[in-house]
Amino acid sequence: MIISKTPFRISFFGGGTDYPEWFRENGGSVIAATINKFCHISIRKLPPFFEHKHRIVYSKIELVNKLNEIEHPVVRAILEEKNLEGGMEIHHFGDLPARSGLGSSSSFTVGLLNAIYALEGRMVAKDVLARGAIHVEHELLAENVGWQDQISAAFGGLNRIDFSPSGKFSVTPIIVPHNRIEELESSIMLFFTGLSRYATDVAKETVENIKTQDTQLGTLHKMVDEAINILQSANSRMDEFGEMMHESWKIKRALASNISNPQIDEIYEAAISAGA
């Protein structure tokens, strides 16, 4: 049995510029970090003694005999393309609920690919995992998602990710003194709202608005350099980083109306007004 462990991520700046509809003309950059919450996937070849050939366990249990009968889109797409011999048993265990806005879908895709490669006796490079996940989500499933989630899940850590019009990407770890990391961690909080949504639904509106929102996306792109300067400068106040995140969030809400909801917006604005 193979077990993979893949981190979820939070995105600080540049989200939106990682969509190919944008960066293939303008380039793009994001700052993202993985967190200590994970997607765990186990996979093994299922012995041929069951009435079913494949067993897929996540929020539901699927017992099927043919790959095209699998309902989980990522599992079906990957297994069909890999065309693995024999039956498969796949179990998913997540530290956080699905569709919570932390790149969980891409973590699942990266984790499943990683586990399958290991089952085949292969340990592939991080960029191969990232490219593979992008291929699955963009080309096989035709989802409206950017590229940062797959890359963050594959590489891990606090990184600057740059996208070029050629379709290449580079990942640069952001080197920050330990005391600044502690200051950053003590200055941010992550909440679960109880709400969930499909990223591709939110991204669809963003993609449709890209050609009319070039000024806003250009601003998000420029914020990446400014934010890194704040993180790496001992003379900068960490609340400057927070103020930039607030400005970035206001721009992103303008790009897609369904990126948030009125109730959460009210809580968010109240917290900002109170100086939280």
Image (cartoon, rainbow, N blue to C red):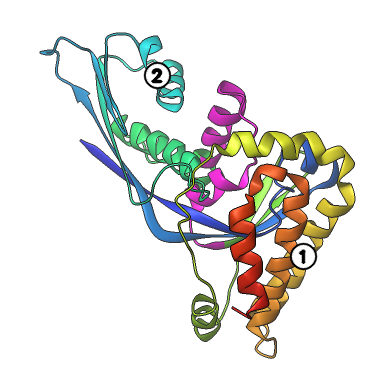
Residue 271 drawn at (x, y percent): 60, 72
* Residue 22 figure quarter: top right
At 61% from the left edge and 29% from the top edge, which residue is drawn?
Answer: 143
Question: Which residue is most to the bottom?
Answer: 235
The reply to whether residue 145 is visible in this rendering is: no
* Residue 60 figure quarter: top left
Q: Main secondary structure of the magenta part?
A: helix
User: Would you name the residue on which mark 1 appears?
Assistant: 223
Question: Looking at the image, is 269 positioned above or below residue 27?
Answer: below
Q: Amino acid at mark 2?
A: Glu
Left or right: residue 219 compared with residue 38: right
Quadrant into which the C terminus falls = bottom right
Q: Which residues are magenta?
A: 130-158
Residue 236 drawn at (x, y percent): 70, 86
Residue 76 drawn at (x, y percent): 42, 20
Quadrant into which the N terminus falls = top left
Q: Nearer the viewer, mark 2 or mark 1?
A: 2
Question: Looking at the image, is 199 positioned above or below residue 34?
Answer: above
On residue 75, the disc is none
Q: Amino acid at mark 1?
A: Met
At 71% from the left edge and 56% from the top edge, which residue is drawn?
Answer: 14
User: Would you name the residue on which mark 2 appears?
Assistant: 71
Q: Residues within 10 Å of mark 1 (few under 14, many from 20)?
A: many
Q: Secondary structure at mark 2?
A: loop
